[in-house]
Image: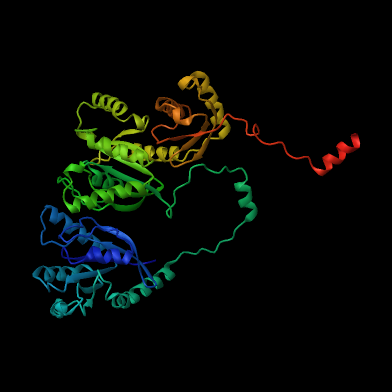
Amino acid sequence: MSFTLAIVGRPNVGKSTLFNRLVGKKLALVDDQPGVTRDLREGEARLGDLRFTVIDSAGLEDATDNSLEGRMRRLTERAVEMADVCLFMIDARVGVTATDEVFAEILRKKSAHVILAANKSEGSAADAGVLEAYGLGLGEPIRLSGEHGEGMNDLYTELVPVFDRFEKLAEDTAPETDVEFDEDADAEFNEGEEIAATPVPTMDKPLQVAVVGRPNAGKSTLINKILGEDRLLTGPEAGITRDAISLKIDWAGTPMRIFDTAGMRKKAKVQEKLEKLSVSDGLRAVKFAEVVVVLLDAAIPFEQQDLRIADLAEREGRAVVIAVNKWDIEEEKQDKLRDLKESFERLLPQLRGAPLITVSAKTGRGLDRLNAAILKAHDVWNRRIPTAALNRWLAGMLEQHPPPAPQGKRIKLRYMTQAKTRPPGFVVMCSHPDKMPESYNRYLVNGLRQDFDMPGTPIRLTLRGQSDKNPYKNRKKAAPSRLRKHLEGRKS
């Protein structure tokens, strides 16, 4: 049973920089401008031999209304309540501000264990700020430099007693695990069990799902509704989410890691460095995901950017689910659904058959169908077809529609096999693969989708050349062996 450490403080004091150092990866976006972090980001931290969970929070603002800053503050206060230990950071070069004093008073009331850290304390310019920190009444401050790694030993010394206390608590509350095991009964149970083709997600290896889309499509609201709590910052403003936040959940019995990504605008409109970092973070989440949920706005579906995002997921070889949000405010639902399906077939032919689900992130309607669509897409993405069944299918396809004969030479397709899954990849051995038209490739791919029930998933088809020539035609006649010479001599 490890403990949870929340890093809190004013904007731009270096919380995300320290978070990245503790987790050993550049997970959180870092920039010189204040207020970059808006959501709570969790990570597995390592400090010496200590292992614990660390939370990076938004900068504490002196706002309590329903503005963006006020909502960010409430989310950070929630992190304080969730955490076992709070690391309150100040900027040693700036010194203690009036806002720091207000938040120090809040932490004294809300958190049982607070560690005070004076960040950016490298050099003599920070000495005055470190001395001022004593006046906050939170004990002796630790001199830290999240960027350069100074003061990590002092932080380790502060956290060791906390780690020992939680380790002792884990030992006292651990359930009994020594049980008798009947090998005969276990063997009898597993005797007729078949091995599943699709890997079953576990808490150690959950199903990776990325939710992507344009700004203000409702991605964070949708994930909050799935979680059943306001874990991500939401609001009417477009572009609230900046980091690709990953959250582990058990959704209807299936362990998943869901990535909430920043809204992706057209490349020409993305000018600021921070937005470029946010978009690249979202693209990286797509590459790590197994299933990508492309979230559309029901009022303006299938805009050019939506098509680019869906095409990106397909090119990356990910299973794709199209979800149309804000369905609760749609009046003509049947007519709208018919138009959506027609537009989907016409604009995204490369994802033919992919599930199209209507949802409402606000009310939660359609989430059960979305869950079922994600699981089916993952199953299809992992599907493996036996070689014998593939070659019987290929013979039927060739009989129904033979390949063309460029320059009078018929292209012969000899056999076919599946080379990989995730996504399904097939190899066809044939003559003249370079002369095969793209239309015939599409004919084979569409046939695979329809006949083997693989709708929507990306399918990779590779043609490999195989020569018609006899490999023994020009080979020199082998010299007769000594035994053969002896037998020929006896016959004569």
Q: Whole-percent x and y of residue 43?
A: 32, 60
Q: Quadrant of residue 98?
A: bottom left
Horizontal arrangement in the rendering, residue 250 relative to residue 144 (left or right): right
Q: Residue at x 22, y 77 (%)?
A: 143
Q: Quadrant of residue 170?
A: bottom left
Horizontal arrangement in the rendering, residue 81 relative to residue 177 (left or right): left
Q: Whole-percent x and y of residue 101?
A: 12, 71
Q: Residue at x 41, y 31 (%)?
A: 455
| In the foreground, 277 or 109 | 277
Q: Quadrant of the C terminus?
A: top right
Q: Quadrant of the N terminus?
A: bottom left
Number of dots carrying numbers: 0
- Report whether residue 404 is seen: no
Q: Whole-percent x and y of residue 259?
A: 31, 49
Q: Residue at x 10, y 59 (%)?
A: 63
| In the foreground, 419 or 79 | 419
